[in-house]
Image: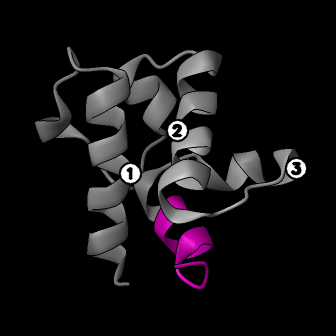
C-alpha cells in the first residue's frame, strides 16, 4: 500500500470517528491531534479501527509514531 493509500485509510477512519472535522485542510506532516482537535479517546478509536478493519496491532509504545499522516504512512507501510 502506498503512502497516499494509507493517508486515505487514516482519513476515512477519522471521518467516521469525528464527522464534523474538516479533513480537506489536513497537512500530512503536522500532528493530527493538534490539527483536528482529537482527544485521546478519538486517537484510541483510530487504533481500534486499524485493528478491526485491517488486523493491524499497534502497541501502546508505538502510538507516538502515528502522530501525523506522514508518520502513520511510514509506520504502517509494512503492516498492510
Helix, strand or loop under label 3? helix
Q: Position of residue 47 (x, y in %)?
A: 61, 43
Q: Residues within 10 Å of mark 2 (few under 14, many from 20)?
A: many
Helix, strand or loop under label 2? helix
Q: Where is mark 3, residue-wise?
A: 61
Q: Position of residue 50 (x, y in %)?
A: 54, 52
Apparent side of residue 38 relative to residue 52 in the rendered image (left or right)? left
Apparent side of residue 50 relative to residue 10 in the rendered image (left or right)? right
Helix, strand or loop under label 1? helix
Q: Residues within 10 Å of mark 3 (few under 14, many from 20)?
A: few
- Residue situated in front as seen by the camera: 41 or 67: 41
Query: Comparing marks 3 and 2, which lies closer to the viewer?
Result: 2
Q: Is residue 70 magenta?
A: no
Give the distance between the C-alpha atoms of the residues marked 3 and 1, in whole angstroms. Answer: 19 Å
User: Looking at the rendering, which quadrant does residue 15 occupy?
Assistant: top left
Q: Give the magenta-colored segment's residue range.
A: 71-80
User: Looking at the rendering, which quadrant does residue 71 occupy?
Assistant: bottom right
Residue extending furthest toward the left: 24
- Residue 46, labelled with which disc? 2
Q: Residue at x 34, y 83 (%)?
A: 2
Q: Residue at x 83, y 53 (%)?
A: 59
Q: Mark 2 touching mark 1, by CB under 8 A?
A: yes
- Residue 45, relative to residue 70: is it above or below? above
Q: Where is mark 1, residue-wise?
A: 10
- Residue 54, labelled with which disc? none
- Of callouts 2 and 1, the N-terminal one: 1
Q: Residue at x 28, y 72 (%)?
A: 5
- Of callouts 3 and 2, the N-terminal one: 2
Amino acid at each position: 500500500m502506498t503512502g497516499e493509500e494509507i493517508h486515505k485509510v487514516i482519513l476515512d477512519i477519522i471521518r467516521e470517528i469525528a464527522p464534523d472535522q474538516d479533513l480537506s485542510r489536513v497537512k500530512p506532516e503536522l500532528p493530527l491531534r493538534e490539527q483536528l482537535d482529537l482527544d485521546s479517546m478519538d486517537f484510541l478509536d483510530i487504533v481500534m479501527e486499524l485493528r478491526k478493519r485491517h488486523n493491524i496491532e499497534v502497541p501502546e509504545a508505538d502510538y507516538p509514531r502515528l502522530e501525523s499522516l506522514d508518520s502513520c504512512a511510514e509506520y504502517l507501510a509494512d503492516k498492510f
